Image: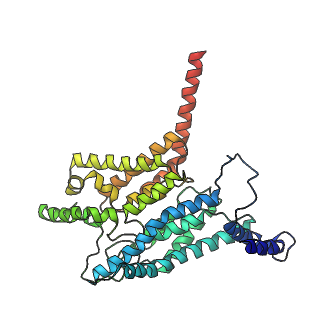
Amino acid sequence: MKALRKFLDKKKPLFEKGGKFAKLQSTFDAFETFLFVPDHTSKTGTHIKDAIDLKRTMSVVVLALIPSLLFGMYNIGYQHFLSIGETTGLMEMFVYGLIKVLPIVVVSYVVGLGIEFAFAQMRGHAVNEGFLVSGMLIPLVMPVEAPLWMVAVSTAFAVVIGKEVFGGTGMNIWNPALIARAFFFFAYPSKMSGDAVWISEKADSFSGATPLADAAALVDATPAQAESLMSGALSQTWDMFIGLIPGSIGETSTLAILIGAVILIATGIGSWRIMLSVFVGGYAMGAIFNLIGANPYMELIPAWQHLIMGGFAFGAVFMATDPVSATQTTRGKYIYGFLIGFLAVLIRVMNAGFPEAMMLAILFMNTFAPLIDHYVVQGNVKRRLKRVKVKA
């Protein structure tokens, strides 16, 4: 490391003002701060001194995503070999998944960071580390059969329209990774729906339907069909928790996601208030539907099962807790999280044609997060003013 440090110090003058490559100063600074902790601090605005900086924060989140990423690679191989009826070892399944997932990860980072570097050079400021997380989240919310050029276009849209037009990292209104997924879904719906997109090179005779698709089919099912679907759904409960089901690359395993949640909470990076509130809100809406029982979907799917289906857990842990687009006040976090879970299950059940509603629920609440914080702060101000008047 000392040799690398000396090499960077030797080349640094070339990229500073007056140097041969001064125009590439932002690019050099990005690589230097990626390898070593920067020796400068913010000089404007109000800041809180802490032992952790943005780079460490992003690194912890990426670390928390690793269990979901690794299991996603294994599950892709598992689903593929299951569909063609072949039995193979764990390593073969993992390697197959690795070969399928790695190009998507590479495309996400190359396109996203390339755009970040270009904007930093044009604006003459340092490259922010925010895309370290977004670059990993985007592949994890994509189907394994997503064409790479579509991933590239979706990533570019998310970085440019979802973040850079607002001023870059820390200024965006919506979660960039969810913007990428939303663009992918609405621009290329055939690649984000149906049974063919969730399992790589599956056999034609193999269904590949996700548990959410089976649950959505309950809406118009006859009693006999509903009983058949539910017997299959209940038998998949353990598989849904472990993650041995078709779905987006990193969203299937609730267990792996919970491991990431423990890492985020233990390090103080993720808000346990938001996570808990999302699950409470989802369970509450599910319980209300169980009481109403207007159709088999409402009546037969237990409230708790909504929490392990689709991308609910992944959204609660990694998407809803984005510190930029989420609420900042303590009470606001409870309200924000509860409404996300509540709306996700509401949309999922009431619109069976769009079973995975976590994306819309989070983006919707991202929009209203500042308003929630505003009313929480104003409420606190009014209560304090009343206390002052009483004392007077």
Q: Quadrant of the C terminus?
A: top right
Residue 186 shows in the view: no
Question: Relative to 347, is 232 above or below?
Answer: below
- The residue at 54%/27% (across/down) is 383
Q: x, y (%) of residue 282?
A: 35, 50
Q: Residue furthest left?
A: 224
Q: x, y (%) of residue 360?
A: 43, 58
Q: Quadrant of the N terminus?
A: bottom right
- The residue at 45%/43% (across/down) is 335
Question: Relative to 25, is 272 above or below?
Answer: above
Q: x, y (%) of residue 134?
A: 54, 65
Q: Camera-side residue: 390 or 352?
A: 390
Q: How is the image coloured?
A: rainbow
Q: x, y (%) of residue 78?
A: 34, 77
Q: Is residue 222 left or right of 243 when viewed as pictured?
A: left
Residue 44 shows in the view: yes
Q: Camera-side residue: 73 or 220?
A: 73
Q: Residue furthest right?
A: 18
